Image (cartoon, grey):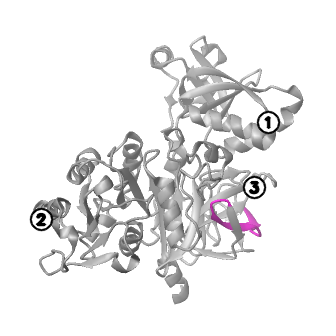
Amino acid sequence: MDIKLQDEILKRRTFAIISHPDAGKTTITEKLLYFGGAIRDAGTVKGKKTGKFATSDWMEIEKQRGISVTSSVMQFDYNNCRINILDTPGHQDFSEDTYRTLMAVDSAVMIVDAAKGIEAQTLKLFKVCRMRGIPIFTFINKLDRQGKEPLELMEELEEVLGIQSYAMNWPIGMGKEFLGIYDRYNGRIEQFRTEESERFLPLDDEGELAVDHSMKETSYYTQAMEDIMLLNEAGNDFDEKKILAGDLTPVFFGSALTNFGVQTFLETYLQFAPTPQPRMTEHEEEVNPLNEDFSGFIFKIQANMNPAHRDRIAFVRIVSGKFERGMTVTLARTGKTFKVTQSTQFLADDRETVETAVAGDIIGLYDVGNYQIGDTVVGGKKAFTYEKLPQFTPELFVKVTAKNVLKSKHFHKGILQLVQEGAIQYYKTLHTEEVILGAVGQLQFEVFEHRMSSEYNVEVRMEPIGSKVARWIENEEDVKESMTGPRSMLVRDRYDNYVFLFENEFATRWFQDKYEHIKLYNLL
């Protein structure tokens, strides 16, 4: 591999931002883009009345509700690094989309609300990161408001998440009395709400303020110094190997809304975040990013990012080599080869044609129905498949029909496209072919209904059939329709596989006792 390409790959830092809803994830994404010069004005989520919306929230329903329900991809340069941020859905009903996004990154930034500490969704996403062994960097946000004691937050990280932590900086005061942060790593104090020239104050050899300053007279400074002494004596040691193994999380305190501590975080993160990492194939062979042959996998498909053009984009994480527009690639699942002439890179919904991209980058390929989530694309002579992406078993189900029968063509087209994005799952009854949709959470149905109306101009009628236990069948040939009953409905999924929808766990066990020879299984 030529040195120039190798250098380009090693400049890449690709990470996802994970958090519970409202912890400030979208706001911090905006600030990072602002520092990277990607946007001139970081529009916070709070800016609804002014008509200013967060850059990373592009879908209409996201602007209305102030939540992220899709994963956006944003790219910018900073300090000689090319950064790819994947902003994941914060809402728990979209954990499947987030889960797949986490398969496409090399590290994660976890945002924690200082007042609320570790919340349910944070814990769930954190477990996915631990499962994959990816490094986690923690930003404790909203220090400009009153919150939990910093030591309590650190303790919570270790006890609830079971990960060691190292405080890279430490707050001096909080809320209205927030004076700044003691930067342990860089050996300085960063002042809150001050002139740029006075932003940093030096420390002496003892770790105390080296200049006369009114901050020294406050109880907040005294308390912070006592905490720092305690951390130095009894806290974890800084260990870069442990960070890269995902066993130690560096912790940063700050306030994304007031843009405090974010730049320091970004600069330190870039020093320790991993470069593009190898990925395993389904045959457990490791593919090195510095391998010359282009390869990647599709972790997300998004319809109608540009409603005027009714387009579909397949998001590809490049795992190895270099992508060049116009190159011929092979879709491993079908063995088909084709020339890629339309490719794009993103800043939320702003897109530009990409001529070249390298391992670690995320690119979008225009899709006319060729791709599926989890597909592998390769540029070399040898085709192979990356390990499977997880799929969740849905828990909620609805029957869906078009309110206007004359719009059935648009209805089926809309459903097909939205189902291929992977947020909802599609089933149909055996003879009447009624459409049933399954989802992990209720909000996915609401987004589906909203998008059918706004993007396909089809009003739908949704009839809840409640929560069901969905089970697939290993030995389909042994299944008979007579096995169905009031508590077990037999349907087909979008791949034409049989699926039983049981009323509840009791009905599932009853069926298994009666038909022992039928081997049932579920997804994640």
Q: Residue at x 70, y 62 (%)?
A: 365
- Amino acid at dot 1: His
Res 457 visible: yes
Residue 488 drawn at (x, y percent): 58, 17
Q: CA distance from mark 1 to mark 2?
A: 64 Å
- Amino acid at dot 3: Asn
Please report the bounds of the magenta region as a residue range.
Answer: 336-349
Q: Is residue 214 above or below residue 488?
A: below
Residue that extends furthest to the right in the rendered view of this protein? 406
Residue under label 2, please give it. Answer: 229
Residue that extends furthest to the left in the rendered view of this protein? 233
Whether the magenta-drawn stretch holds residue 344 is answered as: yes
Res 283 visible: no
Q: Nearer the viewer, mark 2 or mark 3?
A: 2
Residue under label 1, please give it. Answer: 412
Q: Residue at x 54, y 88 (%)?
A: 4
Q: Is residue 302 left or right of residue 100?
A: right
- By secondary structure, the bulk of the magenta-drawn segment is best described as strand
Q: Are marks 2 and 3 in contact (CB under 8 Å)?
A: no
Q: Is residue 111 left or right of residue 187?
A: right
Residue 254 drawn at (x, y percent): 35, 61
